[in-house]
Image: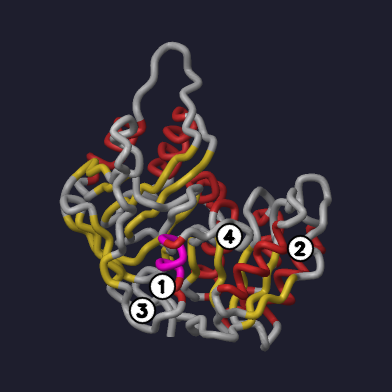
Amino acid sequence: MGSKPLVRPPRLAPGSRIALVAPAGPLLERDDITRAVALCRALGYEPRVAPHAGGHHGYFSGTDDERLDDLNQALRDPEIDAVWCLRGGYGITRILDRVDFAALAGRPRAVIGYSDVTALLAGAGRAAGVVAFHAPTARAEMPSFTRRHFGKVLAAGEPAGVLEPVPQPTDVLVPRAGRVVTVRGGVGEGPLAGGNLSLLQCLIGTPFFPDLSGALLVLEDVNEALYRIDRMLAHLRAAGALAGLSGVLVGRFTGLGRHIDDGSFGLDQVLEHYFAPLGIPVLAGLPIGHIDDQWTIPLGVRARMDADAGTLELLEPAVA
């Protein structure tokens, strides 16, 4: 990332061949692959299911070698136009150092997923110099909001512009559900970087940790206690990773837990503690993360956030 723009992969078009891989956790429902295949076809793409996608080895979809082979074969196959992860879970960090990023650099293609897939997306940017996509996994249901954003970013060779917000809920009993919150106002501009907070912390000290200099940092996570989120942000700060940010885009911290009996901060207070001293804009509650209605975030593409207006604008095309 940094001063050198990343290469944009070719846009997805009708008939694009999509490799469906499970490089981390196993698929626990029999219809996960069926649903992913159907989704690809509904979007106009041709699915190619990896040999071990439906496997099961402990808490992985296959052994390290099996999962790595599926992923590398997809990256090396000249007929594959994109690599779409079926799910996250855990496991990519075990094989990340053996992923054939040279093949991705030699023939760029979209790499798509989120959660544990954050490690693979970071590797695509740092080791291959290619824009990657923090986006729904292939097995997930894709509501119309999510589908529109997926197509707008991955299938259009022009800047997506200001991303459509999630429609505000009408249920007065849950007035804050789906609401974007300005933690600190202002405008920031830079390349998008980040993803799942737990995975970003895991990558500190490795060659795959994203270059956050001047970046708009994207954060999301699931089923984490608030004190653990605090501790991970403290680690990023101590490592110097937060010093040069242009802004912070906080998605959903789904299943947020408060597991300390002697009181607890709120997430907004934790965010203010780490980011307010930096003097940069911070938005929270964005449609990013473990939710049905979510944006597709092209990591490495320049964007502008307006924390006062609560908007994110993509300034460049994400695909060529």
Q: Position of residue 45 (x, y in %)?
A: 60, 79
Mark 3, secondary structure of its residue: loop
Residue bearing the label numbered 1: 153
Q: CA distance from mark 3 to mark 2?
A: 31 Å
Task: Work out whether mark 3 precedes mark 2 in sequence or the reverse, and give the earlier one.
Answer: 2
The residue sitting at 41% across, 37% down in the picture is 234
Q: CA distance from mark 1 to mark 2?
A: 26 Å
Disc on res. 137:
4
Please give left or right for residue 4 compared with residue 77 in the image. Answer: left
Looking at the image, is mark 3 or mark 4 nearer the viewer? 4
Task: Work out whether mark 3 precedes mark 4 in sequence or the reverse, and give the earlier one.
Answer: 4
Neighbours of disc 4 within 10 Å: few (<14), some (14-19), many (20+): many
What residue span does the magenta drawing correspond to?
145-150
Three-letter amino acid code at disc 3?
Answer: Pro
Nearer to the camera, 311 or 174 = 174
Mark 2, secondary structure of its residue: loop
Residue bearing the label numbered 2: 53
Task: Work out whether mark 4 precedes mark 2 in sequence or the reverse, and give the earlier one.
Answer: 2
The residue sitting at 56% across, 61% down in the picture is 113
Q: CA distance from mark 4 to mark 1?
A: 15 Å
Three-letter amino acid code at disc 2?
Answer: Ala
Disc on res. 317:
3
Neighbours of disc 2 within 10 Å: few (<14), some (14-19), many (20+): many
Task: Work out whether mark 4 precedes mark 1 in sequence or the reverse, and give the earlier one.
Answer: 4
Q: CA distance from mark 4 to mark 2?
A: 13 Å
Looking at the image, is mark 1 or mark 3 nearer the viewer? 1
The residue sitting at 70% across, 57% down in the picture is 32
Q: In the image as oriented, which residue stretches furthest toward the top?
A: 262
